[in-house]
Image (cartoon, helix red, strand yellow):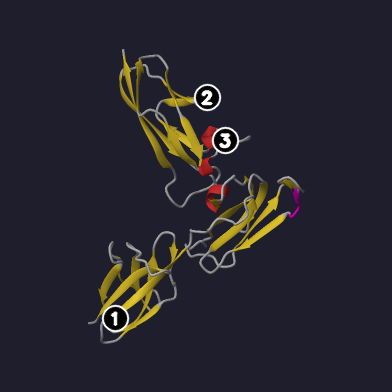
Amino acid sequence: MPDITFHSIDSENRVLSSALVKIYNVEGTVLHDYGSTSLEEGTLTFTLSAGTYWVRAFKSEYAFNKRLKVTVSGSDEAINLVGTNTVDYLPSGASDVCRVSGLLYGASGEPIESGHVTFILSKDCYRVGESGLLTSTNVRGVSDKFGRISFELFKNAEYECRIKSRQDKSIIVMVPDLEVCKLSDLIFPIGSSFSCESTVSGTKDSEVKLPFTYEISLGRSLTSGESFSDFFEIDGNASISGSDIEFKSDSVGSFTVKIYGISKGVTSLGPAKKLLKTVGVTINE
C-alpha cells in the first residue's frame, strides 16, 4: 500500500505544525485514520489502500479546504494542506477607526459563509476631530467563505450590535481606543487579568485585606451598569470590597483563594472560566 504524506502549510508556504488530519471514506461516514503533523516539518504520513478519501485538516485560527478528496493509486504521494489564517487583520489606515474582526461558526462548528452582523450608532451624530461630523448609522458586515468578518468602527463610539441567529441578539458595545480588536472581545468581554500578591497571612477571626488590580478584555475597566461579578468569580472564603480581596476565617491553617475570569451573558463552548490567579492564605492564632 502506498504512503501518502500530508504537509500542513499556510498561504505563504510556512510550516503549520500540529495540524490535526483526519482521513474518512469518501462519504464521510467512516473515520479510517487520524493524527497530527510534526512540529518541525508539518508532515504526517498515512499508509492507505487504493481508493478515494475525504481529508479534513484542523488547526486553531486556520481554515483548510473542507471538500478535499484524495484518490490513492499504487504510488506514494505528497499533498499540501494549505491553511488560511482567519485571525490576523491589518489595522485600519484611518487614525480614528478601529478594525474589528472575528469568525462566525455554525452549530456544527463549520465556518459560516454570508453570515450577517450589523453595527448601528446608538446616537444620531458624533463629532469627529476638530471639524467633522459622523452621521452614518449602519455598518453591515458579511462573512467570507472562511467565516471571517471585519468592520471599521469609530473609536470611542457606542454602537448597537445586531447578530442574526436563532434568536436575533442586540448588544450595546463601546469601541475601544485601539487600532484593532477581536469581535468576540468587543461583544462578549471577559475578565482577562487579575494581579495581586500570591501569598498573604493574617490572624484568626480578623479580616485579611489584599489589594488587587484587574482588566477586562481590551484592557478596559468596569463601566456603568457592570459589576465585578459579571467578569470575575472567586472560589474560596473571600469577597471583594472596593479594590481589596477580603478573607476571614475562624480557624488557623493554610487556605487557597482562586480568581477566575468569566464572560458576561454568554455561554462559552470553550472552558467555562479561566483561572487568572491563585492566592495562598495563612491564618495564625
- Inter-mark Cα distance, 2 to 1: 64 Å
Q: Amino acid at mark 1?
A: Glu
Comparing 8 with 45, the one in front is 8
- Tag 1 residue: 77
For the stretch drawn in magenta, the main secondary structure is strand
The magenta-colored residue range is 132-136
- Write the residue at 42% across / 32% down: 195
How far is mark 3 from mark 2, CA to CA? 12 Å
Q: Badge 2 is on which residue?
A: 242
In this view, 66 is above or below 86: below
Q: Which mark is residue 258?
A: none
User: Nearer the N terminus, badge 3 or badge 2?
Assistant: 3
Front-most of residues 108 and 15: 15
Give the label on residue 222, or none.
3
- Please tell me whether mark 2 sits on a helix, a strand or a loop: loop
The kind of residue tagged 2 is Gly
Mark 3 neighbour class, 10 Å CA radius: few under 14, some 14 to 19, many 20 or more: few
